[in-house]
Image: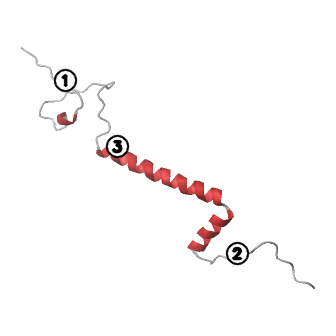
Amino acid sequence: MPEPKEIGHQIKFPNTLMGLFKKGWWEIPEIMASSCLGLLGIGLGFIAVLNYVKNDGDNREYKKVYMIMRPDDPRVPRLKNPVYTQYKG
């Protein structure tokens, strides 16, 4: 009985995690590339949220709910447009 003829070229990948990664890039490059871009987007989004929180991002000049603060409150220097009202009694 004759041996089956090989069609095209056969590529062997090792049975390791890196071999599985290389085989994925060889067989389904669209899925691997979109997965990498998705993970990159999640990472950049996480970094953006951390920077937003670190830089006191929820300090809007115009708010729906107003808060009255004492002058010695530590948050007062971080206000974008503080309005000081002098009450004379």
Q: Is residue 30 above or below residue 60?
A: below
Mark 1 or mark 2: which comes first in sequence?
2
Q: Amino acid at mark 2?
A: Ile
Left or right of 9, for residue 29: left
Do labels 1 and 3 touch, CB within 8 Å? Answer: no
Residue 88 in the image: state x and y as whole percent. 7, 15
Q: Which residue is mark 1?
A: 83
Q: Secondary structure at mark 1?
A: loop
Amino acid carrying mark 3 in the image: Tyr
Q: Which residue is located at x 82 percent, y 73 percent?
A: 7
Q: Residue furthest bottom?
A: 1
The N terminus lies in which quarter of the figure?
A: bottom right
The residue indicated by pointer 2 is 11
Question: How many numbered discs?
Answer: 3
Say which label, 3 or 2, has the lower sequence index. 2
**What amino acid is found at the position of numbered circle 1 in the picture?**
Val
Q: Position of residue 44 (x, y in %)?
A: 44, 50
Answer with the quarter of the image where residue 32 lies: bottom right
Q: Residue placed at 64% from the left, 56% from the top? A: 30
79 to 51, vertically: above or below: above
Name which of mark 1 and mark 3 comes first in the sequence: 3
Q: Residues within 10 Å of mark 3 (few under 14, many from 20)?
A: few
Write down the residue under mark 3: 52
Q: Say what secondary structure mark 3 lies in.
A: helix
Is 46 placed left or right of 23 in the picture?
A: left
On screen, residue 27 versus residue 60, left or right, reads: right
- Distance, label 1 to label 2, CA atoms, is 71 Å
> Which residue is nearer to you in this view: 58 or 36?
36
